[in-house]
Image (cartoon, grey):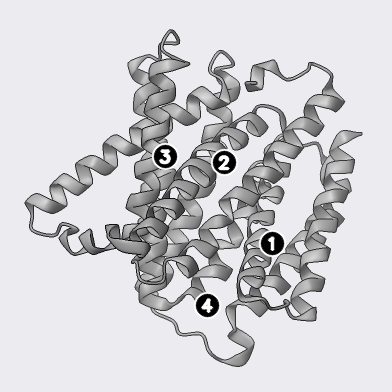
Amino acid sequence: MDATDLPQSRSLSFNGALTCMILATALWALSFVAPLWLDACSPVEITVGRFFFYGLVSIAALLTRYRNMRLRSGHWMRAALYGFVGNILFSLLVSFGVQDTGAEVVVPITGLIPICISVAGSGALTASAWRKLLVPFLMLAIGLGVVLVVQSGILDHDARLSWPGVGAVVVTVVTWTWYALSNARFLRAHPSISGAQWSCAVGAATFALGAVIVCVASLSGHGLASSASIFHGQSGVLFMLTSAALGLGASWFGAVLFNRASHVLPMSLVGQLIVLETVFGIVYTCMWKQTMPPITQAAGMVLAIAGIWLSARELLK
């Protein structure tokens, strides 16, 4: 079922889109535990494997289900732009930031993305709507802040800081905020393009861009020849299965759900719901390590989710 197939009742459509967005964040959060499964692989190798599968399934869907739905050259240029900014550039900048300044610094900064999207996407709201959403926004911001401060380890004085890495992650926040807002506006301006079709177009464009980058890197002597070992033995099977889960689930199906939700939900709410990616990621990590989150972090998660629920209730009125 495509986004255009959703029932026309506002309440049912809104709730359906809300469910799509929650499921999308649950899939995106797989990215937090993939490095734990593939601790012998670099972030670049994981990224290449992920977008390989994302591109393959996208191209297959375009050649079968959407072969009669033609996109113009301008649409393909936009898909390539979103594929580069939303997928490739995001992965490269975050990977560089983690290697340069540490995940304990990167995680709190990237946690600003939901707030930035909520604020930037709320320009069309009336003053009265802003007043009603002020308390939920504050609850979300405080809850997310508590979660990220505990997650970062800053209170334990374990964080290290490098300005190039910090700058890269700040650029990530700005570019991904732009991508989320621009992508939603594009879909609303082109209702004939379904969320699933657009996800496939962006995936195919990402695959093509990734292939170009790999070819250029190989010709310049900076290829991934050393990565060949990850395709052998039990580690190779784990790498392929994890890459498939990330490419097919987190990237392709997650993008389908995100695009469907973007057709219906206000961007202020979409931005807030993205915070659930952090919450799911923490839950998955705790499940993998068989540990429980600190009580302070758990309280922050509850406060953030309560803020999202209150804002959704206000927007449904």
User: Where is mark 3, residue-wise?
Assistant: 54
Q: How many marks?
A: 4
Mark number, residue 104 = 4
**Amino acid type, residue under disc 4 in the picture:** Glu
Mark number, residue 279 = 1
Label 3 close to label 4 by CB (< 8 Å): no
User: As drawn, is 10 to the left or to the right of 221?
Assistant: right
Which of the two labelled residues, at mark 1 and mark 2, occupies the earlier sequence position?
2
Horizontal and vertical percent for residue 167?
A: 40, 67
**Amino acid type, residue under disc 3 in the picture:** Tyr
Establish if 86 lies above or below 79: below
Mark number, residue 137 = none
Which of the two labelled residues, at mark 2 and mark 4, occupies the earlier sequence position?
4
Mark number, residue 254 = 2
Residue depicted at 64% across the width and 32% down the height: 262
Which of the two labelled residues, at mark 3 and mark 1, occupies the earlier sequence position?
3
Classify the position of the C terminus by image quarter. top right
**Amino acid type, residue under disc 1 in the picture:** Val
Label 1 close to label 2 by CB (< 8 Å): no
**Amino acid type, residue under disc 2 in the picture:** Gly
Establish if 269 lies above or below 304: above
Which of the two labelled residues, at mark 2 and mark 3, occupies the earlier sequence position?
3
Q: CA distance from mark 1 to mark 2?
A: 16 Å
The local crowd at label 3, few if under 14, some if 14 to 19, many if 20 or more residues have their Cα within 10 Å, is many
Horizontal and vertical percent for residue 130?
A: 81, 45
Dot 2 falls on a residue whose secondary structure is: helix
